[in-house]
Amino acid sequence: MKKTVTTLADGRELLYYDSRDDVVRDAVDRRPLDAVSTSSEVRRDPLLGDSVAIASHRQGRTYHPPADECPLCPSRDGRLSEIPDDSYDVAVFENRFPSLAGDSGRCEVVCFTSDHEASFADLTEEQAGLVLEAWIDRTAELAELPQVKQVFCFENRGAEIGVTLGHPHGQIYAYPFVTPRTELMLRSMEAHRERTGRNLFDDVVARELADGERIVLTGEHWVAFVPYAAHWPYEIHLHPRRRVPDLRELDDAARTEFAQIYLELLRRFDRIFGPGEPPTPYISAWHQAPFGEPGREEFGLHLELFTIRRTSGKLKFLAGSESGMNVFINDVPPEAAAQRLREVASA
């Protein structure tokens, strides 16, 4: 992998990740951009104890542009975009409309491919492996920022999720606090250790392997299953067999196999509801250990992949119980979801 670091016209950082070492990235951003002005602020909720990012400047962000005006496509044919070069493998840049900025953290956009019509599932194993290397590199660099407590790499796919740009891309949030979901996991992990003397993440994976009914896919280095208490209609958790706290500590074998396993899971997602159905909307989210927290080495890196579509033409809405009380009601039994995800395996 070759990494090239440059800046955009307004001073934001842009990074190219190329699979070939002989690629030269020297294109200059020629857009007449003003300096980015953000109003990001993190406020603490005194009742719930969690944090909310207030970012009013995001109201003006780009919203469903036509394909020939996509800001994530390469700059070519006289049209200038966020990517000055006329092609790229993987590109990462600071978000022009960040939810978190400055002392409140950092937000980055990860462009998986220059092909506007592709999806992550269309990538080759080499391309998917390059995206993984970009995630790892960004986690390592963002971890060095003094204000950052946790790095979150994720992808939103589909208009139903709220995606406003159709180009295949994901995001990275570098939070200045430990997220509520992670705090819950850390508390559960500590309580499990006190009660049993064992690691919670190890026991969860071992339980699913022993039961077998909710296993979706296994490899030499990864295990994918529908969790016992899945929140979403179709939800997969992907764990490395060798527990590590974050992406940086995956060994070469696990990194190599990841592309094969992950691409197969994404392709199965698009086949859940049968032929002729539109692409399945999903969220793909890496859970990494926060930095500087007690028990960090006990945390288990894993990826959660889930869709809000519960059946053909119908979505799972977060209504009163889910949004008001954070109590999920799942219409699809996890065992049935796992069975369906095994049925749609690639030939």
Image: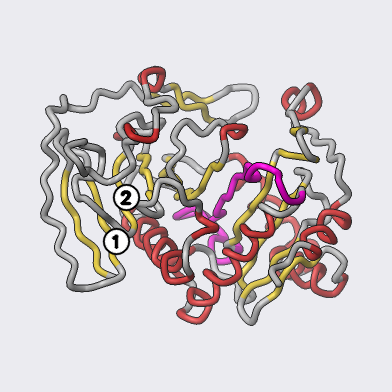
Instruction: Give amino acid for label 2.
Output: Val
Q: Residues within 10 Å of mark 2 (few under 14, many from 20)?
A: many
The image shows residue 89, relative to residue 259, as above or below, that is above
Q: Residue at x 51, y 46 (%)?
A: 155
Amino acid carrying label 1: it is Tyr
Q: Residue drawn at (45%, 80%), measured in percent from left and top?
A: 252
Taking 116 as reference, is 195 left or right? right
Q: Residue at x 32, y 50 (%)?
A: 92
In front here: 272 or 77? 77
Q: Find out whether the residues at labels 2 and 1 contact each other: C-beta distance under 8 Å.
A: yes
Placement of 203 over or under 142, stated as above or below? below
Q: Quadrant of residue 5?
A: bottom left
Q: Quadrant of residue 332?
A: top right
Q: Is residue 185 above or below residue 325?
A: below
* Residue 84 coordinates in the image, percent (x, y): 19, 45
Quadrant of the rendering where the N terminus is positioned: bottom left
- The span picked out in magenta is 274-300
In this image, 28 relative to 64: left or right? left
The residue positioned 52% from the left and 30% from the top of the image is 51
Instruction: Verify whether residue 342 appears in magenta.
Output: no
Q: Which residue is mark 2?
A: 92
Residue 236, horizontal then vertical, whole percent:
70, 56
Residue on which the image places disc 1: 17
Secondary structure mostly taken by the magenta-highlighted segment of the chain: loop
